[in-house]
Amino acid sequence: MTLPVEQYFVLDPKQIAHLGGNRFVLTVPRINLLSVWLEVVAEVTVTTYPPDTASGRPPRVVLQADNCRISGSDLVENMALDQRFAMRFVTELTWSTSGGGEGAGAAAVAPTGEIRATSKLDVWSEVVPPFQLLPREVLVGSCNGVLHGLVGSLLPLFVRMLAADYQRWAADPAYRADRATRSQPITV
């Protein structure tokens, strides 16, 4: 959690590109609804925070969307959805340790831990024809269901990929060396 952002390694270059510094571009997998599709691209700023011993807060990494864009099929483009919506998300990753470090012989027991992630997603959008014919509660409920499902599937996948990459990085000196030579920002 305390690794400088500039040393981050892109786990999936099809979905994440490093712009340099603490900025990344995240491409959400294409969403298909019958013959209509859309893609969301977000510029994400990553900020690391050291542990706060006064409050007991662990080190953390915060990802925040700075700019989001929608593109898609002809219908999506014709409705100009990109100009009719705004999205903000903030995800916080923390490391929680447990086990080890207590009792007799504890030095031989390695502590275990887990990456915890919390997310907040806010979306604002104009209601475009023909959706204005639906009751607002139906639209909000439908959109919340889709977004909850998307975040609910993508965030755990991201955290699993991150944990697996860290385990390999921690145990394999050749992998660490290779990553150090390949961790160059992509200029877009």
Image (cartoon, grey):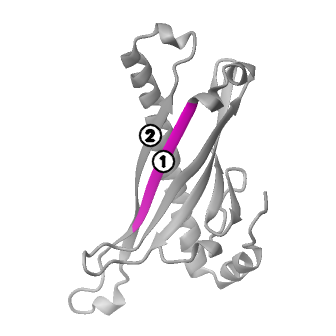
Disc 1 residue crowd, few under 14, some 14–19, many 20+, Cα 10 Å = some
Q: Secondary structure at mark 2?
A: strand
In magenta segment, residue 22: no
**Foreground of the two, 141 or 105:** 141
Residue 51 spot, x, y in % from top left:
37, 78
Q: Tell me which numbered mark, 1 or 2, is placed earlier along the sequence.
A: 1
Residue on which the image places disc 2: 122
The structure residue drawn at horizontal position 66% and vertical position 20%, both measured from the top left corner, is 79
Question: Badges 1 and 2: C-beta atoms under 8 Å apart?
Answer: yes
Q: Which residues are magenta?
A: 85-94
Q: Residues within 10 Å of mark 2 (few under 14, many from 20)?
A: few
In the image, what residue type sits under mark 1?
A: Phe
Q: Magenta region's main secondary structure?
A: strand
The residue tagged 1 is: 89
Whether residue 30 can be seen here: no
> Residue 161 location, x and y as percent?
56, 59
In this rendering, is residue 185 above or below 111?
A: above
Question: What is the residue that sits farthest to the left in this orientation?
Answer: 103
